[in-house]
Amino acid sequence: MPTQIKISPQRTPFDMGSSFVNATAALNPGLILDSSYDDYMSILCGINGSAPIVWNYTGQSCLAYNNTISGADLNLPSITIVTLNSSRTVQRTVTNIAGNETYSVGWSAPYGVSMKVAPTRFTIANGQTQVLSVSFNATINSSSATFGRIGLFGTQGHAANIPLSVIVKIFYNSTNS
């Protein structure tokens, strides 16, 4: 009888997550990324045709949320850009819930993308916030998500990981002159 070889599909960060659970470290994370109820409502209300569904489930009108945002702009500890055409900048706001600390920022860009994070170093006191601007530039088309990450490394031992997933779809304008 022939030996059967079981081949598992390639694993991606969607399968693995961003890290392992360390319950002790979770009690003192250093930085947090915070999103509010209104932020989520702004995303839901920004989906074309969603107003009646939002009203049905929440009893709230989307008229109160005229500043809608896209999913990539929600202040989550990950960044997903479904269609990166040429360039896009998103922001993440971190809040320090520990003592004063200086953080260095490093990253590895997803395949087909060049990127920059600013600032690359910052000092933040307890209770303060810092905005990180993450700029993505498409370099090569991709048919599936490619992955990278941003790492925030504090001088007091805190570390944060922001996983990235991007699908690059460069649209060319071909007009005849």
Image: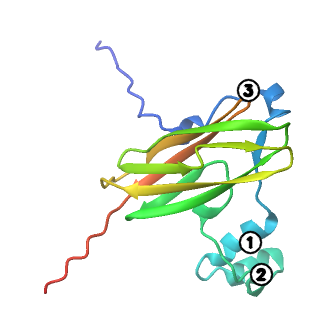
Label 2 belongs to which residue?
Answer: 55
Nearer to me, 3 or 107: 107
Q: Can you name the residue that lies furthest to the left here?
A: 177
Of the two numbered discs 3 and 2 on the same chain, state the one appearing first in sequence: 2
Q: Position of residue 31 (x, y in %)?
A: 76, 42
Q: Position of residue 83 (x, y in %)?
A: 43, 62
Q: Are marks 3 and 1 in contact (CB under 8 Å)?
A: no
Of the two numbered discs 2 and 1 on the same chain, state the one appearing first in sequence: 1
Residue at (40% x, 57% y) in the render: 137
Quadrant for the C terminus in the image = bottom left
Report whether 54 appears left or right of 19.
right
Q: How is the image coloured?
A: rainbow
Q: CA distance from mark 2 to mark 1?
A: 11 Å
Number of numbered discs: 3
Q: Nearer the viewer, mark 2 or mark 1?
A: 1
Residue at (69% x, 79% y) in the render: 67
The three-letter code of the residue at mark 3 reads: Gly
109 versus 20 height, above or below = below
Q: Are marks 2 and 1 in contact (CB under 8 Å)?
A: no
The three-letter code of the residue at mark 1 reads: Met
Label 3 belongs to which residue?
Answer: 157
Residue at (30% x, 69% y) in the render: 171
Look at the numbered disc 2 and give the secondary structure of its residue. Answer: helix
Look at the numbered disc 3 and give the secondary structure of its residue. Answer: loop
Label 1 belongs to which residue?
Answer: 41
Report whether 23 appears left or right of 148.
right
Classify mark 3: residues with Cα within 10 Å, few (<14), some (14-19) or many (20+).
few
Q: Nearer the viewer, mark 3 or mark 2?
A: 3
The three-letter code of the residue at mark 2 reads: Trp
Q: Position of residue 170 (x, y in %)?
A: 32, 64
Of the two numbered discs 3 and 1 on the same chain, state the one appearing first in sequence: 1
Q: CA distance from mark 3 to mark 2?
A: 45 Å
